[in-house]
Image: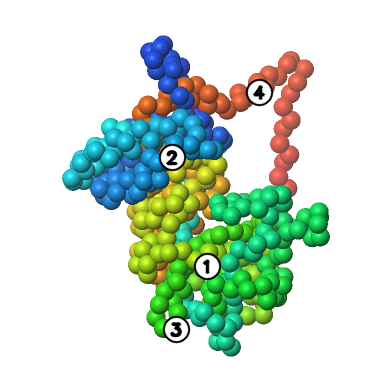
């Protein structure tokens, strides 16, 4: 079992470890780049501290990591990802190309040779947070009819990211988005309620038509879908752009108005409630002003969708992470008790995952969305997960971990409280006596 992670003691331990080994750091090591992950605390671990590490399927994890390497190795100009972490992952990927992971033991040896684990969490917190996502499979039609009357829109041409410029690809998943009004004025883009009321009708933006606005909402939350046409063919759609308004979880509104108890919240419960109360559901959807647009992608009916890294996701191994803090391709070992085998959080989840995707709601150093695959069963599992988890980031060995440890802030010292001879502590007020009535 991994030892408990107590923030205050872990920070003190980490600082003392760094101070203790400072004199042992060689001049060469002092030149190594340091790990820098804002707003996070790191605690060095041994592999034996990771519960279930030796029993995991490391060959599956190695294959998923190699998928990430396909995107990492060709990058000669990584742009915003430039830095020691990306460079170190490139070096490891080069070694991985010639490494033969013929069995689970050798695959595990690759990770243990090239990485070292560290517990990671937000400053002051003991654990991270997990959710799940999946790829919906829904019925659709290439043409409008009374049965198929919900449009699934492609990106409009007048979307202006940042309120200033147009982009043809790589549309950000966060930040302001505007539309031009007249020659110079830029105003916020339409909200969900306006779009659902038909403000974009007649602009020939429909990729296809769906039966149910709930299906559209869930596709927008997940970011991709397989749409099954009446002739049995499948078209694949993926995230293309958003309207610039912040995402607000509809589940939160349903909890606040008492429609669904917090302990029963899941995507299945949201769907059931919206089907029972269609008019109220329309109002609830409009409270989430965010709206997502899609693009058709050339994937077969059986291929997994591509994440933000540009590689196909692996069910049970790929995660979405905060791209502002982490580099795609970074491995994480996650330990949690989750409601996978049943609706109760009794499944021991001990698994090496790889960051290959992101999402607007994925914020923080120990925050992940677990990808579970496509279809109804995957959706049921993903929709149940909103649970804490313990995160260990696998850091490339060439990075200077001790240098990072020396920069971890310690908790502020407690203020001294000294009584002078003239000071006395106030006595507590006597509790009122309550006599039972006769």
Q: Secondary structure at mark 2?
A: loop
Residue tagged 2: 75
How many residues crowd mark 3 within 10 Å: few (<14), some (14–19), many (20+)?
few
Q: Quadrant of the C terminus?
A: bottom right
Residue at the image position 55 percent from the left and 26 percent from the top: 410
Q: Is label 3 in a helix, a strand or a loop? A: loop
- Which of pointers 4 and 2 lies earlier in the amino acid sequence? 2
The residue mark sitting in front, 3 or 2, is 2
Residue placed under numbered mark 1 in the picture: 219
Residue 297: where, in percent of width, then height? Answer: 46, 64
Image coordinates of residue 319 in percent, x first then y, are 43, 51
Q: Which residue is mark 3?
A: 230
Badge 2: residue crowd in 10 Å (few <14, some 14–19, many ≥20):
some
- Above/below status of 233 relative to 99: below
The numbered disc on residue 415 is 4
**Mark 1 or 3, closer to the camera:** 3
Disc 3 and disc 2 in contact, CB within 8 angstroms = no
The quadrant the N terminus occupies is top left
Of callouts 3 and 2, which one flags the residue occurring earlier in the amino acid sequence?
2
Q: CA–CA distance between discs 1 and 2? A: 31 Å
Residue 292 showing in the rendered view: yes
């Amino acid at each position: 079992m991994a030892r408990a992670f107590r923030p205050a003691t872990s920070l003190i331990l980490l600082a003392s470890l760094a101070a203790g080994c400072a004199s042992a750091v060689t001049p060469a090591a002092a030149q190594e780049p340091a790990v820098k992950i804002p707003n996070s605390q790191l605690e060095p671990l041994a592999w034996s501290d990771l519960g279930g590490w030796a029993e995991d399927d490391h060959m599956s994890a190695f294959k998923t990591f190699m998928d990430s390497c396909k995107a990492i190795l060709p990058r000669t100009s990584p742009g915003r990802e430039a830095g020691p972490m990306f460079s170190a992952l490139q070096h490891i990927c080069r070694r991985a190309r010639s490494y033969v992971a013929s069995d689970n033991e050798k695959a595990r040896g690759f990770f243990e040779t090239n990485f070292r684990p560290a517990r990671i969490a937000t400053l002051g917190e003991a654990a991270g947070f997990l959710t799940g996502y999946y790829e919906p499979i829904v019925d659709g039609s290439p043409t409008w009819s009374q049965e198929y009357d919900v449009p699934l829109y492609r990106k409009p041409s007048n979307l202006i990211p940042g309120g200033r410029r147009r982009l043809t690809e790589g549309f950000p998943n966060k930040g302001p988005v505007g539309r031009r009004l007249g020659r110079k004025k830029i105003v916020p883009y339409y909200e969900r309620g306006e779009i659902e009321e038909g403000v974009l009708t007649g602009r020939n933006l429909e990729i296809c038509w769906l039966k149910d606005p709930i299906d559209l909402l869930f596709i927008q939350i997940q970011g991709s879908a397989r749409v099954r046409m009446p002739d049995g063919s499948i078209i694949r759609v993926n995230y293309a752009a958003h309207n610039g308004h912040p995402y607000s979880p509809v589940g939160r509104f349903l909890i606040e108005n008492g429609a669904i108890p917090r302990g029963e919240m899941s995507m299945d419960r949201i769907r059931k409630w919206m089907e029972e109360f269609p008019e109220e559901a329309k109002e609830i959807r409009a409270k989430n002003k965010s709206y997502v647009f899609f693009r058709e992608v050339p994937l077969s009916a059986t291929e997994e969708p591509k994440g933000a890294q540009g590689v196909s996701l692996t069910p049970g191994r790929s995660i979405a992470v905060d791209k502002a803090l982490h580099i795609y391709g970074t491995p994480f070992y996650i330990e949690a008790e989750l409601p996978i085998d049943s609706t109760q959080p009794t499944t021991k989840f001990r698994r090496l995952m790889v960051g290959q995707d992101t999402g607007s709601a994925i914020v923080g150093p120990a925050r992940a969305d677990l990808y579970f695959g496509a279809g109804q069963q995957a959706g049921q599992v993903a929709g149940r997960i909103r649970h804490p988890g313990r995160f260990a980031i696998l850091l490339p060995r060439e990075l200077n971990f001790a240098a990072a440890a020396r920069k971890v802030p310690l908790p502020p010292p407690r203020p001294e409280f000294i009584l002078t001879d003239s000071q006395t502590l106030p006595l507590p007020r006597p509790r009122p006596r309550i006599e039972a009535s006769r």
